[in-house]
Image (tube, rainbow, N blue to C red):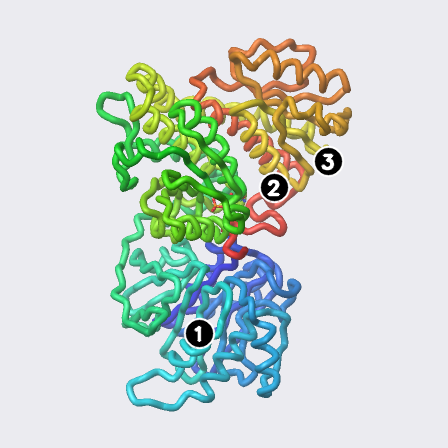
């Protein structure tokens, strides 16, 4: 949430930051702004709306050697130019961009007003800019020390809440300061230039050398040097990581939208996630980074999955699969609920977080709470070096490639596939036979090809989307393993098309949502063959009897009476364990095409941001 890019070095600060902001726009797109030290002082430009508006206001190739910039997802205060970042102290010395929430900003503001500082915005960030200015004004000159750095450090000691910040000071045109607590911040080390950003994505055009800051750390950057100190002002020995991203992975290429690109990238994302993770005998999966031995895992009595949003739906699939194939009791909690609930957990509980970004604050906070209580923690996540990845005892990287579209698609199916592989792995060290294991491995290996087959039906799905695009309500219904996919289908449609949609276990429909059924409310049924199929069919009949249109996504071997289905999307027959993945593809495409029909901005849906780093 909120994107930050700060730059120090050559005479290209403005253009580098602008490029970075465009790459970070998925973190928030209410307004954008930039402050550049241009040789004559601080030049601040802010605009409501997209980064394109800021670009227009900046004109041709904004230069400068030092600057900070921001793309905003509003927390405190309306979407106005005054509330857009950077915020400048009332003495015009300090400029700050901030991601997070300063919880004690009101008392800070009161104190500062008493001291004569003035405020132009409703934001919490402006209080921090003025607080730094206040400490800076009082800070004595000491040879060999930066007054600027000292005043930032002092100010941060008074901040309650979460922050990722970049700060500049008009008296220090050769220094850029960044700090984090709770909100992500990385440092890019270039040649004759250094950067700060909230996401690696923003800086890979300049450097592949990255330092992931830890909570409480402050980085002091000059164009050729950097120094990191901990919360207690001790020097930190930084580890520089090499980012293995190809910048083109985060570009649109021939696609119209990132959501479309990422839906179509799923076969590759799945291949990358499973590569090198099957045993030589083809009967199980294994993961390099779990840091838990089979013996440790045999002692696990219960698994608790925590996540938010789409990743929470992936956890629900994991629950079904792990209970079914590994016979370990699983519970799934919204991370934000777990954190504040004093849940009694057995000491042999394993806590598993799923997060695409690895930065979602609710998931991170829940994970920390679990760690504090002494539980072993693992994660599935897609962002190498992310905070969750670093703080877990072990984990599994998705290798799905950068996901830019705000609506998660390839990250979801990749999480579900890894959950299936975890179920296989845990099952094989407990109760699954060699034959059962090889059947699952074969089904997983078939998956990318089957997903390609479904993607080949995109024109058919687009024509169905056209037919229903003007509906204002949708139901998504499925049983067992299809229930989480119904929830995910409803979430996807809501996010990108703003149509009200609800996901339910198909049988639950009779207990309330059936009241919504009408010719104007389509139901998307997710039906797979097997024992439960006749029950799903009965639920479809109930909808049809009330004249509700039915779009059915069904496995090829389902015997469906043509008269009750209005529109049918078939997916290849498969092993049960991979069905949630296959059934997800049509619902993603349906949502995407419906949103296009309605003229929605699918990659930047209103009010949303890709990575939710505030509680
Ligand atoms: O990065 P995370 O997987 O932790 O994000 C969790 C949710 O914020 C995310 O899945 C959100 O629900 C997406 N917008 C769904 O498309």
Residue at 76%, 19% (x, y): give it: 547
In the rendered image, the vertical position of residue 103 relative to residue 584, given as above or below = below
Q: Secondary structure at mark 2?
A: helix
Q: Cβ–Cβ below 8 Å for labels 2 and 1?
A: no
The residue tagged 2 is 496
Quarter of the figure with the C terminus: bottom right
Q: Cβ–Cβ below 8 Å for labels 3 and 2?
A: no
Mark earlier in primary sequence (3, 2): 3
In the rendered image, the vertical position of residue 203 relative to residue 512, given as above or below = below
In the rendered image, the vertical position of residue 528 relative to residue 484, given as above or below = above
The residue tagged 3 is 472
Label 1 vs label 3, nearer the camera? 1
Residue at 58%, 43% (x, y): give it: 602
The residue tagged 1 is 157
Q: Cβ–Cβ below 8 Å for labels 1 and 3?
A: no
Mark earlier in primary sequence (2, 1): 1
């Amino acid at each position: 949430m909120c994107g930050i890019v700060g730059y120090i070095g050559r005479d290209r600060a403005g253009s580098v930051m602008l490029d970075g902001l465009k790459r970070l726009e998925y973190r928030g797109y209410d307004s954008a702004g930039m402050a550049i030290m241009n040789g004559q002082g601080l030049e601040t430009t802010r605009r409501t709306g997209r980064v394109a508006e800021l670009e227009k206001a900046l004109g041709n190739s904004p230069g400068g050697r030092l600057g900070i910039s921001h793309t905003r997802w509003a927390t405190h205060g309306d979407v106005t130019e005054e509330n857009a970042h950077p915020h400048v102290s009332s003495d015009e010395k300090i400029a700050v961009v901030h991601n997070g929430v300063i919880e004690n900003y009101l008392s800070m503001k009161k104190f500062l007003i008493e001291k004569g500082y003035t405020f132009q915005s409703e934001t919490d960030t402006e209080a921090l800019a003025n607080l730094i200015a206040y400490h800076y004004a009082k800070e004595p000159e000491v040879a060999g020390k930066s007054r600027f750095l000292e005043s930032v450090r002092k100010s941060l000691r008074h901040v309650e809440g979460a922050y990722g910040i970049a700060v500049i000071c008009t008296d220090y045109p050769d220094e850029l300061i960044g700090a984090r607590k709770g909100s992500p911040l990385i440092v890019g080390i270039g040649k004759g230039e250094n950067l700060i950003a909230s996401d690696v994505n923003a800086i890979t055009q300049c450097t592949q050398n990255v330092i992931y800051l830890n909570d409480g750390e402050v980085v002091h950057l000059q164009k050729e040097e950097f120094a990191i100190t901990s919360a207690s002002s001790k020097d930190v020995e930084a580890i520089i990581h090499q980012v293995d991203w190809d910048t083109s992975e985060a570009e649109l290429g021939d696609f119209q939208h990132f959501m479309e690109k990422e839906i179509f990238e799923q076969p590759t994302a799945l291949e990358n996630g499973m590569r090198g993770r099957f045993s030589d005998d083809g009967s199980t999966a294994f993961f390099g980074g779990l840091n838990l031995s089979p013996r440790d895992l045999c002692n696990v009595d219960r698994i608790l999955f925590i996540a938010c949003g789409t990743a929470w739906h992936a956890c629900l699939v994991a629950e079904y699969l792990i209970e079914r194939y590994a016979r370990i009791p699983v519970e799934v909690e919204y991370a934000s609920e777990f954190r504040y609930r004093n849940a009694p957990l057995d000491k042999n509980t394993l806590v598993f977080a799923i997060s695409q970004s690895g930065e979602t604050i609710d998931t991170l906070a829940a994970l920390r709470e679990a760690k504090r209580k002494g539980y072993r923690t693992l994660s599935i996540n897609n962002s190498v070096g992310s905070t969750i990845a670093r703080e877990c005892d072990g984990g599994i990287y998705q290798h799905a490639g950068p996901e830019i579209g705000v609506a998660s698609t390839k990250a979801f199916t990749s999480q579900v596939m890894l959950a299936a592989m975890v179920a296989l792995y845990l099952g094989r060290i407990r109760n699954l036979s060699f034959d059962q294991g090889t059947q699952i491995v074969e089904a997983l290996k078939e998956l990318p090809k089957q997903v390609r087959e479904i993607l080949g039906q995109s024109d058919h799905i687009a024509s169905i989307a056209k037919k229903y695009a003007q509906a204002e309500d949708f139901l998504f219904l499925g049983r067992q393993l299809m229930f989480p996919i119904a929830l995910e289908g409803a979430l996807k449609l809501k996010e990108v098309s703003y149509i009200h949609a609800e996901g339910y276990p198909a049988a639950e429909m009779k207990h309330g949502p059936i009241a919504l059924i009408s010719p104007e409310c389509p139901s998307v049924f997710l039906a797979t063959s097997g024992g439960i199929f006749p029950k799903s069919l009965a639920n479809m009949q109930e909808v049809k009897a009330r004249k509700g249109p039915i779009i059915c996504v069904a496995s090829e071997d389902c015997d469906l009476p043509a008269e009750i289905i209005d529109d049918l999307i078939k997916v290849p027959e498969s092993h049960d364990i991979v069905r949630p993945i296959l059934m997800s593809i049509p619902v993603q495409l349906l949502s995407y095409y419906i949103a296009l029909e309605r003229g929605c901005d699918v990659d930047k849906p209103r009010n949303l941001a890709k990575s939710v780093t505030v509680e």
